[in-house]
Amino acid sequence: MSLETFRKETRDWLEANCPPGMRVPAKGEADICWGGRNWTFASDDQRIWLERMAERGWTVPTWPKEYGGGGLSKEEAFVLKEEMKAMKARSPLDSFGIWMLGPALLKYGSEEQKREHLPKIARGEIRWCQGYSEPGAGSDLASLRTKGVLDGDEYVINGQKVWTSYADKSDWIFALVRTEADAPKHLGISFILIDMETPGVSTKPIKLISGKSPFCETFFDDARAPVSNVVGKPGQGWDIAKYLLSHERAGIVSDAVSGGLNPVGAAHLAGEVDENGQIADPILRGDVARLTIDALAFESTLRRVKDEADKGEGVGAKASILKYVGTELNKRRHELNMSALGSDGLLWEGEKEEDGEAARSWLRSRANSIEGGTSEIQLNIVAKRVLELPGS
Amino acid sequence: MSLETFRKETRDWLEANCPPGMRVPAKGEADICWGGRNWTFASDDQRIWLERMAERGWTVPTWPKEYGGGGLSKEEAFVLKEEMKAMKARSPLDSFGIWMLGPALLKYGSEEQKREHLPKIARGEIRWCQGYSEPGAGSDLASLRTKGVLDGDEYVINGQKVWTSYADKSDWIFALVRTEADAPKHLGISFILIDMETPGVSTKPIKLISGKSPFCETFFDDARAPVSNVVGKPGQGWDIAKYLLSHERAGIVSDAVSGGLNPVGAAHLAGEVDENGQIADPILRGDVARLTIDALAFESTLRRVKDEADKGEGVGAKASILKYVGTELNKRRHELNMSALGSDGLLWEGEKEEDGEAARSWLRSRANSIEGGTSEIQLNIVAKRVLELPGS
Amino acid sequence: MSFVLNDEEQMLRDSARSFLSETAPVTAFRKLRDDNNPDGFSRDLWSSMAEMGWTGILVEEGHGGVELGVFAAGLLLQEMGRTLTPSPFLSTAVLAATALRVAGSDAQKAKWLPKIVSGGTVIGFAVDERARHNPEHINTTAKKQGNGLVLNGTKRFVANGAAADAVIVVARNEDGAPCLVLVDCNQKGVTRKARRTVDSHLPADFTFEDVALDGDALLDGAEDTEGALKHILDVGRACVAAESLGVAEQAFDVTIDYIKNREQFGVPIASFQGLQHRAAHLLSEIEMARSIVMKALRTLDETPSQAPIWAAAAKAKATAVSRLATSEGIQMFGGVGMTDEYDIGLYYKRAQAAGEFLGDDAWGAGQVAKLSGY
Amino acid sequence: MSFVLNDEEQMLRDSARSFLSETAPVTAFRKLRDDNNPDGFSRDLWSSMAEMGWTGILVEEGHGGVELGVFAAGLLLQEMGRTLTPSPFLSTAVLAATALRVAGSDAQKAKWLPKIVSGGTVIGFAVDERARHNPEHINTTAKKQGNGLVLNGTKRFVANGAAADAVIVVARNEDGAPCLVLVDCNQKGVTRKARRTVDSHLPADFTFEDVALDGDALLDGAEDTEGALKHILDVGRACVAAESLGVAEQAFDVTIDYIKNREQFGVPIASFQGLQHRAAHLLSEIEMARSIVMKALRTLDETPSQAPIWAAAAKAKATAVSRLATSEGIQMFGGVGMTDEYDIGLYYKRAQAAGEFLGDDAWGAGQVAKLSGY
C-alpha cells in the first residue's frame, strides 16, 4: 500500500471510529488513559477508543502484530500520528509498558515473555511501573542495594526503590535487583519482572512540591519472583537499563515539548496583552521570543535526529543532548508561563478543578532535569562520549 | 583638619591648579600619562598637571610623604577622588608602579628599596612593567621556568616572560624568577627588580586581536641583577605575587566599570533611538536594561566592599567575586555596545583617529576574564576559599 | 551612605534572627499550611512582633512607633525571608504604615498608626487590578458623593487580604488622578475572596460595589498624592526585595550544606567542578543582590528622591537571584529537592510569589530603562 | 522535508570542503588582510567558484546556472564560514541572483544572470540606511523622470561594496512603495566610500545624488515587489546564518582540539568538569543552530510561504550561537586566544559582522514575536 493510500484509509477509519469526546485535547492528567487491572474509564468514549485502537494494534503501532501491535512501518506510524494530530485525536493509551518495558522486551525478552506481557500492555490490561532508583543513589544509579537471593527457582528480593512512578496504581513492576553480590558494581544486576500483588511488595506515595504524588517508594520484603521473570540473562540488567533509559529520555523530551500552556497563551489567559495581541510587557515579550526561537530550534532538532535515525545514523549519546536541551527548555517555558500569568499563576487551590494547574505544571517541570538522568549527567555523557574529552 | 575643610581646600587647590586641557575626559589611551625615562608629554598641560600633583604627592595620595606620597587618610583620598571627578580632572599619572609595585614595596620592600624606587614612581620618572607569566604557563602561574643562578652577589637570569604589558616602553621590570631549583613548585621563586637596560634583556611586542600591542614577550639572556634587588626574602616571591595579583584584580575591575562607551550612548551615536530617546529595538532595550541593573548592583557592591574594608573586614577572596563579576559585566557591556552600534561598530579603520575604537575596546575587553587570573580561576578560589567546598 | 550595619542595626538583625529561628522556623510555616490556617499566619506571632516594636518600625514615636526606617524594615524582612515567616508585616507595618505616614492627615495618623503599632489591626494595600503588577492600570474609582465618597472597582491578590480588617485602596478620583482610600472590610458593598497561593499565603481578591464612605476615608495629607503613591510602592519594592534576598541566602546556605555532605560515586558532590563553578557564580549573584538591596533601602531613608531607579533595580535583581538560587537549589538537591519533605521547594515557591509582588524582573527592567531615559 | 543531506548535497559539501581547505584556508584570508587587498577577496578564487558552478547555484539552467537551490547555497556558505573565506558569493550569487530571479524581467535576467554565473561581475545588494538592520527604514527614492528614473539616497555598509561593479538598491518609488533598482557603480552621481571592517571585509557606503537611470534599471518582473524583497532578504538571512553556523562549528572544533591538548596543573584542561560542561552545552547549542538553519534553508526551497519565521529564527539562533562559540573559544584558549597569531579571534570577529548582517539576534527575536502574532 502506498503511503498516500495508507494516509487516506487511516483518515477515514479515524474519522469513523474516534468518538467525539476523544477529539478534544486532554485538559490534564485526569484525561489520560493509563489502563491496568483497576482502571476506571473516565468516559465511555475513552473505553471505546481504547478498545477500537487496541483491536487494530494502534496503541503500539510499530510493534509486531503477533504481540498485539499494528505492524506498521515507521513511515506509516508517522502518518498515523500526523492524522491523529490533525483531528486532535487523543492518545488512546499511555503507559510505561508502551514507552519503556515494551522496547526492552522486544530487544531482550524471551519469546515466552513477549507473548505473555506485550499483548496485555498493548490492550491496556496491565499497568507497569519501573523500579530503578534507590534512596541515596541518585545519579549513581548502579550503586543499588536491593538484593535478590536465589532460592530454588525463585529470587527472594529485599530492598527499597524510590521514584517508582504510579507504583500505587500499577500491577507489575520491572526492577533492577542485585543478584550477584560479589560481581563488580555495574555487573551483577538483573532486570526482573515482579507482580505487585506478590506478598512482601508494598508501596507508599511521595508528596511532591507540586502537591501531586505520581511517585512512590516501593518496598520488597522477602518478595519472591521466579527466575523465568528475569529479562535477558542474570547480570545483564545494567545493559537493559541503559537501553531503557534512552527510551525514557525520549519520553521526557517529548513531554517537554508537547502541548500544555505556553507563555503566549498564558499572557492571553491573564489578559496581559495589548489591543494588538502583543504581550504587554516588552521585556517579557523579548524573553518569550527567545524561548520561541529555541523551541523552534529544538523542534527542528527532533525532526533532524529522527531523519538521521531513519537513514541509519544511530542516535546514541545524542539522546543526551536532546534530554538536556529539551528539559531545560521546558523549565524555561514554565518559568515564563508563570511570569506571564503574574499573580494568576500563583493560585494554588480554587473552586475550579484546573485552578492551580499552571503552578503545579511549573513545579512538576523542575523534575525534568533530574529524572531519567540529571542535566549534569547528560552533560557528562556528551563530554565523554560525544566530545571524547579526557576524564578528570 | 576636618574632612569638610579638607574638601574645600582640595577643591580650591584643584580649581587653581588643574590646567584646562586636563579637565576634559581622556578620549583614549593616547591621552593617558604613563611617565618614564622616555616619556613624551602629549601637551604642556599634561606635563604641568603631573608636576603639580607629584609635588603634593597626590599622584599616590595615600603613600607616606617620605616616599613621595601625599600622606592622606583613606577618607581624604576618597574626597580627593570625588572632587577630581566632580571637575572632570584627569588622572595625572597611571602606572603599574602605582597600582602594583608600590603596594608590594610598601609591604615587603626594604627601607632602601622604598627610598630608591617609590619617589621615582610617584613622580613618573620610572615606568615599570611586570614579568609574571611565561609561555605555556597560563593559569598555572607557579609553573614558571625563568631561572636565576647566584653568581657572587648577582643573579644570572635566563628565561622568557610573556604578557609583559608595555615592556617595550618600560624602564624597569619586576619579575618572578625561580632562584632555588630544588625547592617545591610554589617556593623557590624570588621577586626581583631588573633594570631593562641591563645587557641581556630584550623585548618584542605581541600583536593582539584588537590590533594593538600593549603586551610583549620579554627575554632574559644571562641578564644580571644584584641580590639587593630581591624584594622580601629569596623564595618569598610567590607570596608577594599573590598579594600583588589582588591589587591587579582591583585595577582590572575598576577599568571594567570606569567610563568608556555604554550601550545607551552607543545607540545614540548610531542613531538607533526613537524620537523619545528610547532604544529603537525593544529586545535590545531589554538586554541593555538588564545590563544596567547588573551594573548598578556591581557598583553598589564595590561601595559595600570598600565600606566593609574601612570597617576592618578583609576583602580577601571576595576580590575574586569582584574580578569575576566585573570582568564578565564589562564583556557584556562591550557586546551590547557592538549590537547597539550595528554596522557602525564593525568599522576597523577610517579617516578619523577614533574610527574603530569601539571595536578595539570590545575586543580588548575579552582579555578581562583571562588576565589577572581567569574567570575559571576566580570561581575556583570562591568555591575553595569562600565556600570551602571540598577538592575534587 | 553606609553599606555596613551600624551597631543598632546589627543588634536588630541578630535579635530578629534568633527570635524567628526560635519562634517562627520553617516548621511553624509548615504547620500553618498543613492546618489550613484561615489567616495564613500566626496571630500570636503578629502580637509578638508588636511587642518587639517591629510593627512600629516605620511609625514616628509620637504615634507609638520606633521609626527605625526603611533599612531596618528591610533587615527584618530579609530574616523573615530566611525562615519563610508569613505575617502582615509587609502589608501592614510597611505598606499601610508608609501610606498613612506620607499620605495620611494628622487625624488619620492618630487614628490608625497606633492600631498598627499595637498589632491590633491588619491592613492590606490594594493596588493591582490585573495579573501582572502595573500601578498605571487603575480603573477603580473613588468619586465624591455628598460629603463622602463612593468606591467602585476590583483589586486582585491583595496581600494578607484574607485576614485584613481594612484595606488601603489605590483608586482614581473624579479627575482621574490617583488617590488612596482606607476601607473597612466589613463595609457594605465590599466582597472578598481569599486565594490560597503556591507559597501558602492567603491574599484575597476584593470587589467594591458602590461602597459609600465617609470623607475621612480619603488619605488626603499629601501635597502630591501621586508622588506619595510612588514612594509607598518603592518602599514596598525595596522591602520585598529584601525578603527575596533572605529567601535566596537561606536557599543557598542549605544547598551548599547539602552538597558538601551528599556523596555520589564515592565523593561529596560538592567536589565536582561543575557544581563548584555554579555555586561560586550563585554566591557572586547573591552578593550583587545584597548590595543593591541595601542601596535601595538606604536611599529610601536618606535621599528618597533618588530612590525610584534603585528600588526598581533592586526588585528586579532580587527577584531574578532568588529564583535562580532556589531553582539551582532544587537541581543540586536532585530528586529529594522535588519532595515536599525538603524545604528547598518551599523557598522556590516563595521566590516566585515574592518576585511577582509589586513587579518582577521584567517589570523592573522596563522601569529601569524608563527611569534612565532610554 | 528532509533534515539529512541527499547524495548530491553530500558530494557538494565534501567537494566544497576539500576545495576551500586547499585553496582558501584561513592563511589565505590572512594574506588578503595583511596585503590590504583592495577588493577584500581573491579575484582568482571568485573565478574558481564560477568554474565550479557555485556562482550559478541559484540561477536556472537557461541562464547558465545549475539551480541547486537555497539549501545548497547554504551548504557552501557553511563551508566558507569554516574557512573564513571572503568572496562576493553571498552578495552576488545569493542576494543579487535571487533579486534578479524573483524580481527581474526576462530581459534583465538574460542580461545579468549569465554575467553572475560567469563570475564576470560583482553585484552588491544595498538595503540598510541605518546602523542596525531594518528593511522598513528606506528613505532612498527612485522616482520616475521621463522614461527613466532618478535615484537619491544613501546606503551603508553594502557587502562587497568596495569591489562591486553594480548594486541593487532598495528604494521607494513615487508612491512610497519599495522597489529594486540596479545601478552601475560608475554611473554619474554615485559615490562610494569603502569601509574596512573588523572582520577585514570591505563593504562600502554609497551615496546616490540625482542619479539618472534608464527605465530598465528598475527590476519590475515581480507581481509583488514588496513580497519579493522580503523573500530575497529571507534567502540572504538563511544563507548568512549558514555561514555563521560554519564559523561556530569550526571555532568549536579548534577549541575542543586545543583544550584536549593544552595541559595545566599537569593535566589536559579538557579534563576539568567546569570546561566539560560548557563544551557539552556549546555542542548542544550548535546542534540546535544546525537544525534550525537547515530547516530555514529547506523551507525556502520547498515551502517559501512559510519561510519568514524560520529565516528570522535561524538568523537569530545562528548569530547567538556563533558569538557564544567564538567567545567561549577565546576564553578557553586563554591568553593566546587574544593574540592575532591564533585564528580563534578571527572567528570571533566574523561572528560579530555576520551576525549584524541582515539582522542580529535581537532583531530576529522581535521579528519572530511579530510573525507569531505576539
Image (cartoon, coloured by chain):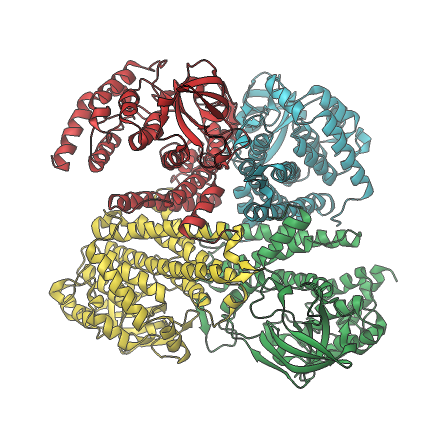
Chain colours: A green, B red, C yellow, D cyan
Question: Is any atom of residue B353 visible in this view?
Answer: no
Q: Position of residue A129 (x, y in %)?
A: 66, 74
Q: Looking at the image, which residue is at 39% across and 30% down?
A: B234
Name the residue rendered at 26%, 73% in the picture. C46
Rendering coords of residue C251 (x, y %): 42, 61
Q: Nearer the viewer, residue D256 or C303?
A: D256
Q: Is residue B337 above or below residue C121?
A: above
Q: Is residue A102 left or right of residue B195?
A: right
Q: Position of residue D177 (x, y in %)?
A: 57, 36
Q: Position of residue D11 (x, y in %)?
A: 80, 37
Can you name the residue that lies furthest to the right here? A1
Name the residue furthest bottom.
Answer: A199
Asked whether, in this view, residue C286 is left or right of residue B11, the answer is right
Looking at the picture, tell me which residue is in the foreground, C337 or C191: C337
Above or below residue B322? Residue A9 is below
Above or below, B125 relative to A248 = above
Q: Quadrant of the C terminus of chain C?
A: top left
**Figure label count:** 0
**Relative to residue B382, is residue A92 depicted above or below?**
below
Q: Nearer the viewer, residue B374 or B221?
A: B221
Residue A381 in the figure: left or right of residue C294: right
Task: Decide if residue D66 is in sight here.
Answer: yes
Q: Quadrant of residue D98?
A: top right
Q: Quadrant of residue B233?
A: top left
Give the camera-side residue of D374 and A47. A47
